[in-house]
Image (spheres, rainbow, N blue to C red):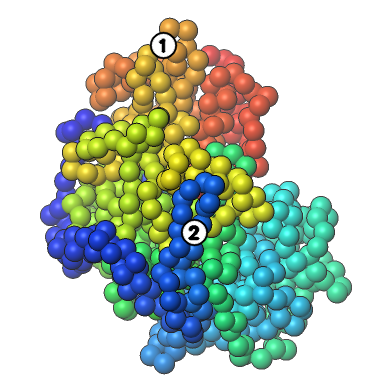
């Protein structure tokens, strides 16, 4: 990144209402001086049925690992998300549901959400699901997915949501890994005008695993699906109306498990990330308000799927714990056409919009008229998460979508962290396109070199966290040793994120990509994100993914996979043009040694570029691609291998 590309946009932040810089600085100071007092105060935003007497008991020592927050307190997550809002907000909208078709939507009040959730909880209970049991949720983006999560939380069952785009095999391995006894699904899902055979997939998955005694099926399309007597139950047609609309909530210990969620699988076999109740809920409620500057009455929309942690923390638990109105979208950004997001924003007067770089880059590839034909007048804040956002895409999001008046919060976090750790606070933080900026109050990152030495000031290295925060994961389900080995062994006494980062002279963090992806060219360490951003800043390039490959002279060479904008042609002239462009943006050292034009890149089902597969292909290691079960479109791999062989 050349300095000229670092654009400060404090003017934009100043124009919005928002948190002020002084308050943020005060919070940071308090969190540093008195972390226990700080977090104890934050936790008061929840309703505790039994107050905690100890804020935390934490040790990051790998031989004596302990992560406990608010340990002797009791609360119920569902009560905190629903019941407690009823006295003031029974008729306020909890969920705006926007269906796959643009004329299909509905609004659900807090009172209605509570009733549906209690009914679902009663159905689970009647079929023997109890505290501690695992329930897999394999659902489309319909309100019943949220009820299912909250119903589990209400009775103390542990949910594990599996993204509805996963195959029967992937579903089976997750059911097996967490030992689920119940599955909640739908007859079919509907996405982008197509149906997804969810119940049939469940049936196939259950042919490969034992232990599931109940399959509760929500009728989304009314399709004819096979039902196994004694095991399967329809929600509307059978179960819902036979149970009471009220259900007492199970008091949960703060450290009781709330859910298990498998990571996206960008780097390897998915991990069953386990989160507990008190710390997680405190942290997501706190960060949802701080990062999105949420004010009562505002319409908030996160476009993630509930199958990912972003959907857990920032569609369901965070917003509902704050009594917010959360929009849930069943469809895809390009159906019926590429203006869908912007039309939905106008239709429901969305104030805060949170999406992923992959969606931004895809929509940027289309004509701007898809955006400019809408007003987006209600918008005041934009957010992004999931991958480093290239400054080029950031600026498009800012200028075209946000009309240069909405700040962007680039939020860095992980399934493991439960909630956002590094992000601008709107109004309090000057923005730089491509930087996640500063840690939130109460979060303490550091950058270390390969030997674990803490680097000071402006530097680049590996990103760690030196202390705990309440939303931190507690273990890898069923494999505590993997938890210790993965996160606490590399840099003793700290949590290792697996990500690389650069810190600039203003203390701003720039995530450079995963540490495993760092390329070493003639002794120079280079993050993939920087080279990719340089490529994407060329007007003909839509997306780029960069990996290292063995090179006789340099040790590692730079291999760049590039997809082009609609209508652009790949040829030798463009190859040279792109190489020269990178050379002038970053320097000769970053010039790609091999450029591979491809119609598409391999992505996880959450839309992230899977560089580990690209690395293998670049190395000509076609037979050892590793776990590809989390790929959205496995066909892409064959095209890439063909392209590689032709080099
Ligand atoms: P797995 O852990 O199974 O390989 P994953 O890391 O993709 O999958 P997630 O927990 O969904 O699973 O993603 C977290 C990772 O996404 C982070 O570690 C980081 O690499 C990347 N990431 C998320 N948000 C940002 C951001 N704002 N900027 C840069 N990178 C981000
Ligand atoms: Mg990860």
Q: Quadrant of the N terminus?
A: top left
Residue 65 drawn at (x, y percent)? 52, 52
Q: Nearer the viewer, residue 542 or 347?
A: 542
Circle 1: element type: loop
Q: Quadrant of residue 284?
A: bottom left
Residue 620 relative to residue 572: left or right: right
Please give the name of the residue rendered at 54% of the width and 47% of the height, measured from the top-left corner.
63
Please give the name of the residue rendered at 67% of the width and 54% of the height, measured from the top-left corner.
478
Q: Quadrant of residue 136?
A: bottom right
For the residues carrying marks 2 and 1, which lies nearer the camera in this image?
2
Do residues under tags 2 and 1 come within 8 Å of each other at their CB atoms?
no
What's the mark number on residue 390? none
What's the mark number on residue 67? 2
Circle 2: element type: strand
Q: Quadrant of residue 409?
A: bottom left
> Does the Cβ of the disc 2 residue fall within 8 Å of ligand 1?
no
Residue 430 relative to residue 362: left or right: left
Q: Is residue 447 visible?
A: yes
Label 2 or label 1, whichever comes before in sequence order: 2
Question: Quick one: which residue is furthest to the top in this view?
Answer: 553
Q: Marks 2/1: CA distance?
A: 44 Å
Residue 364 drawn at (x, y percent)? 36, 44
Residue under pointer 1 = 554
């Amino acid at each position: 990144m050349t300095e000229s590309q670092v654009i400060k946009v404090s003017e934009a932040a100043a124009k919005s209402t928002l948190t002020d810089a002084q308050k943020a600085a005060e919070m940071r100071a308090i969190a540093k001086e008195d972390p226990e007092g700080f977090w104890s105060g934050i936790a008061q935003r929840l309703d505790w049925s039994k107050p905690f007497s100890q804020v935390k008991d934490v040790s990051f020592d790998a031989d004596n690992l302990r992560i406990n927050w608010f340990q002797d307190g009791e609360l119920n997550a569902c009560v905190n998300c629903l019941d407690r809002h009823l006295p003031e907000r029974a008729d306020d909208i909890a969920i705006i549901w926007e269906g796959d078709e643009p004329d299909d939507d509905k609004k659900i009040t807090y009172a209605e959400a509570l009733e549906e959730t209690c009914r679902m909880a009663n159905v689970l209970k009647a079929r023997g699901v109890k505290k501690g049991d695992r329930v897999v949720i394999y659902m489309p983006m319909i309100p019943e997915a949220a009820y299912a999560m909250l119903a589990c939380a209400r009775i103390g069952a542990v949910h594990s949501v599996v993204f509805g785009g996963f195959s029967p095999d992937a579903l089976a391995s997750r059911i097996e890994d967490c030992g689920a006894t119940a599955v909640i699904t739908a007859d079919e899902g509907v996405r982008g005008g197509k149906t997804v055979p969810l119940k049939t997939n469940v049936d196939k998955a259950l042919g490969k695993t034992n232990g599931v005694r109940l399959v509760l099926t929500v009728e989304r399309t009314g399709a004819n699906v096979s039902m196994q007597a004694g095991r399967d139950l329809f929600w509307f047609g059978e179960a819902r109306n036979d149970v009471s609309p009220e259900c007492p909530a199970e008091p949960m210990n703060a450290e009781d498990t709330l859910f298990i969620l498998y990571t996206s699988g960008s780097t390897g076999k998915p991990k069953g990330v386990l989160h507990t109740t008190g710390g997680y809920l405190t942290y997501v409620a706190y960060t949802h308000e701080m990062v999105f500057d949420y004010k009562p009455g505002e319409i908030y929309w996160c476009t993630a799927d509930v199958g990912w942690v972003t959907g857990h923390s920032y569609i369901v638990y965070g917003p509902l714990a704050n009594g917010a109105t959360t929009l849930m979208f069943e469809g895809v950004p390009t159906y019926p056409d590429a203006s869908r997001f912007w039309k939905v924003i106008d239709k429901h007067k969305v104030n805060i919009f949170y999406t992923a770089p992959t969606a931004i880059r895809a929509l940027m590839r289309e004509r701007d008229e898809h955006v400019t034909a809408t007003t987006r007048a209600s918008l005041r804040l934009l957010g992004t998460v999931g991958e480093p956002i290239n400054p080029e895409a950031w600026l498009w999001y800012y200028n075209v979508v946000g009309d240069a008046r909405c700040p962007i919060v680039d939020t860095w976090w992980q399934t493991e962290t439960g909630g956002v750790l590094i992000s601008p606070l709107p109004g309090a933080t000057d923005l730089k396109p491509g930087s996640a900026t500063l840690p939130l109050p109460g979060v303490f990152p550091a950058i270390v070199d390969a030997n674990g030495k803490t680097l000071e000031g402006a530097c680049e290295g590996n990103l760690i966290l030196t202390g705990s925060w309440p939303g931190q994961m507690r273990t890898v389900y069923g494999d505590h040793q993997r938890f210790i080995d993965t996160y606490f062994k590399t840099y003793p006494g700290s949590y290792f994120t697996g990500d690389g980062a650069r810190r600039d002279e203003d203390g701003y963090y720039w995530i450079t990509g995963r540490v495993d992806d760092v390329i070493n060219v003639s002794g120079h360490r280079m993050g993939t994100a920087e080279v990719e951003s340089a490529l994407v800043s060329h007007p003909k390039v839509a997306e780029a993914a960069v990996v290292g490959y063995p090179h006789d002279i340099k040790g590692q060479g730079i291999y760049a996979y590039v997809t082009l904008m609609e209508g652009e042609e790949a040829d030798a002239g463009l190859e040279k043009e792109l190489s020269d462009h990178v050379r002038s943006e970053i320097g000769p050292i970053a010039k790609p040694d091999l450029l591979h034009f491809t119609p598409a890149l391999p992505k996880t089902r959450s839309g992230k570029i899977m560089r580990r597969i690209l690395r293998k292909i670049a190395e000509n290691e076609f037979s050892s691609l590793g776990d590809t079960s989390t790929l959205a479109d496995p066909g892409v791999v064959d095209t890439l291998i063909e392209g590689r062989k032709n080099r």
